[in-house]
Amino acid sequence: MAQKKPKWVIEKERNRRAAAAETVWLFGIHAVRDALANPMRERLRLVVTRNAADRLAEEIAASGMEAEISDPRKFAAPIDPQSVHQGAALEVKPLDWGSLSDLCAPRGTPARVLLLDRVTDPHNVGAILRSAEVFGARAVIAPHRHSAPETGALAKTASGALERQPYLRIKNLATTMEALREMGYTIFGLDGTAAQTLEEAKSGVDGAIALVLGAEGPGLREKTKETCDALVRIDYAGEFGSLNVSNAAAVGLYVVKPSS
């Protein structure tokens, strides 16, 4: 008689199958175009209007996909009717960017990494991915729970950056911060109440730097603060010193960009 599997084993296998079956619908001309051109992306179904098919003709041909032509008045893709899809939607599997060490090991270069603590708005994360790509961050890292998953809204805001900028989802933020520290990163947590500015703190660091940003309102969790090497603020003029998290990410990455 076969031995019955423990419940935790059955649950683990079920979760693994569910993750493998998960798909994402990307929408919008830019997001779909870049996903079609990304050799890392597993593509499943493409729905386009005749107009969008003409605009994406080169990318569709190169991808080898067969597009489903849909009436724009009854768009066939199962996405929110309010989505600004521009007549293009692509069903894909989430990207697999590999391991933390593969992506973030400094290897003698002044690496930069962003970590997000409970940043759940896909529009903010999409904008952060764009900034991370512009400033050459190795990865944007966020926990699986309480963070923005890979969605069509995130991809559209990222305007193609989702296909090129690693967005790594991890189990535990504090554990990942410790792993980065062991790789040689100095970890700065952005906190508007900190006494030291990011520019002041950065001046004493020659190696890799990781910036940690919290959600607007609650900011960084206490455990996250305790795991940072230092809490810093972005220098500001006047009495008002609060930035949207995506703006703070862009400014922070600019401040710590490696010297040319």
Image (cartoon, rainbow, N blue to C red):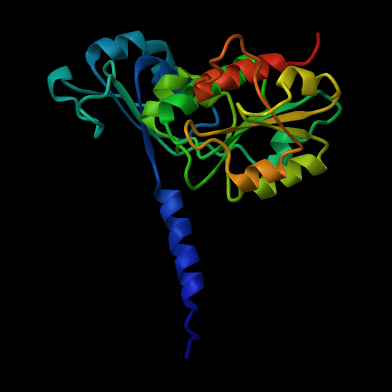
Image quadrant assignment for residue 65: top left
| Total marks placed | 0
Report whether 77 appears left or right of 192. Answer: left
Report whether 43 appears left or right of 111. Answer: left
Question: Residue 133, can we see it?
Answer: yes
In front: 144, or 20? 144
Figure quadrant of the C terminus: top right
Q: Position of residue 112 (x, y in %)?
A: 72, 26
Report whether 174 appears left or right of 14. Answer: right
In front: 141, or 31? 141
Q: Position of residue 183 (x, y in %)?
A: 81, 39
Report whether 172 appears left or right of 67. Answer: right
Instruction: State the residue at coordinates (50%, 37%).
Output: 218
Q: Residue furthest front?
A: 239
Q: Residue furthest bottom?
A: 1
Question: Residue 99, can we see it?
Answer: no
Instruction: State the residue at coordinates (74%, 46%).
Output: 178
Q: Position of residue 251 (x, y in %)?
A: 62, 15
Image quadrant assignment for residue 75: top left
Instruction: State the residue at coordinates (83%, 36%).
Output: 184
In front: 179, or 242? 242
Q: Position of residue 249 (x, y in %)?
A: 59, 22
Instruction: State the residue at coordinates (77%, 35%).
Output: 105
In front: 150, or 97? 150
